[in-house]
Image (cartoon, rainbow, N blue to C red):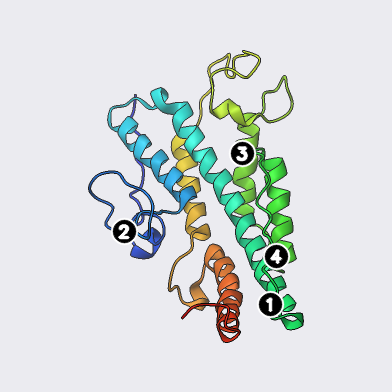
């Protein structure tokens, strides 16, 4: 098997902000301030590390489903993260308006993303959450990636996507997911996803003129949460 080269991970520190854990060497650990990486990017990095190992020994076919599932799950988690972020911003804005009427108003609850996995359901939910806060539409590159994954998850005979196709060899009825040989462009998918995530990842301290899509979304929240925090402090509702 001919080895396929992957480009190196972007070495710029800004790319790793929120991606890798701070001082991530040593025993595996998670939690706390320094061991809570961005979850979607963590899955994407896991796919890359697995690919690099498989390419090194010329055994890409051994890891098709694990890598494809990691790649797919990274996208699903990212779409749900966008929904959560937009809804949190909407919640803070609503709370601000409620405080104008009652300085003891409690924060409204934030509805979590739906517990579904099919992109045909997830994308409209994310788009609606962004529309509610008058933010940009979902990046076209993200929509295109989701469509490619949906196509890969759809068996011609079924005509509808099954997210478990990239997870198990057989579906819940025991039917083979890939009864015939099927080439999956894992390396191409990884390269495309990493390019996409460079636009979606939040970069701390990025100049406003250079902010990518993900940073601009997060900053929409900062524009509300920081003054909201000051206001709550002035009302005596926050400890010093």
Name the residue tied to disc 4. 108
Residue 110: percent from the left, percent from the top? 67, 59
Cα gap from disc 3 to disc 1, whole angstroms: 48 Å
Question: Which residue is drawn at the image coordinates 36% and 48% (left, top)?
Answer: 30
Number of other residues with Cα within 10 Å of mark 3, as a class: few under 14, some 14 to 19, many 20 or more: few
N-terminal label among 2 and 4 = 2
N-terminal label among 2 and 1 = 2
Cα gap from disc 4 to disc 1, whole angstroms: 12 Å
Name the residue tied to disc 2. 22
Residue at the right extreme, as displayed:
101
N-terminal label among 2 and 3 = 2
Name the residue tied to disc 3. 148
**Residue 193 vs residue 229, the one in the foreground:** 229
Residue 10: percent from the left, percent from the top? 36, 56
Question: Which residue is drawn at the image coordinates 68% and 45% (left, top)?
Answer: 114
Number of other residues with Cα within 10 Å of mark 2, as a class: few under 14, some 14 to 19, many 20 or more: some
Cα gap from disc 2 to disc 4, whole angstroms: 33 Å
Q: Secondary structure at mark 3?
A: helix
| Left or right of 82, for residue 45 | left
Q: Secondary structure at mark 4?
A: loop
The mark lying in front, picked from 4 and 1, is 1
Cα gap from disc 4 to disc 3, whole angstroms: 37 Å
Cα gap from disc 2 to disc 3, whole angstroms: 34 Å
Cα gap from disc 2 to disc 1, whole angstroms: 38 Å
Question: Which residue is drawn at the image coordinates 52% and 53% (left, top)?
Answer: 196
The mark lying in front, picked from 3 and 1, is 1
Number of other residues with Cα within 10 Å of mark 4, as a class: few under 14, some 14 to 19, many 20 or more: some
N-terminal label among 4 and 3 = 4
| Left or right of 36, for residue 11 | left
Question: Which residue is drawn at the image coordinates 59% and 28% (left, top)?
Answer: 164
Q: Is residue 151 above or below residue 207?
A: above
């Amino acid at each position: 098997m001919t080895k396929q080269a992957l480009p190196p991970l972007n070495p710029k520190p800004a790319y790793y902000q929120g991606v890798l854990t701070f001082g991530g060497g040593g025993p595996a650990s998670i939690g706390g301030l320094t061991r809570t990486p961005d979850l979607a990017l963590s899955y994407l990095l896991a796919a890359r590390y697995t690919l690099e190992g498989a390419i090194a020994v010329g055994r890409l076919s051994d890891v098709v489903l694990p890598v494809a599932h990691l790649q797919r799950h990274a996208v699903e988690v990212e779409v749900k993260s966008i929904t959560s972020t937009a809804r949190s911003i909407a919640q803070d804005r609503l709370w601000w308006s409620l405080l104008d009427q009652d300085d003891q108003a409690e924060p409204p609850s934030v509805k979590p993303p739906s517990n579904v996995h099919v992109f045909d359901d997830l994308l409209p939910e994310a788009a609606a959450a962004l529309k509610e806060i008058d933010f940009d539409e979902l990046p076209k590159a993200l929509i295109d990636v989701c469509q490619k994954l949906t196509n890969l998850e759809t068996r011609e005979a079924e005509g509808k996507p099954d997210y478990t196709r990239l997870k198990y060899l057989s579906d819940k009825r025991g039917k083979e997911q890939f009864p015939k040989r099927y080439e999956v462009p894992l390396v191409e998918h990884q390269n495309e996803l990493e390019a996409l995530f460079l636009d979606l990842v939040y970069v701390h301290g990025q100049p406003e003129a250079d902010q990518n899509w993900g940073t601009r979304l997060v900053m929409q929240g900062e524009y509300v949460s920081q003054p909201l925090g000051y206001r709550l402090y002035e009302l005596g509702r926050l400890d010093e």
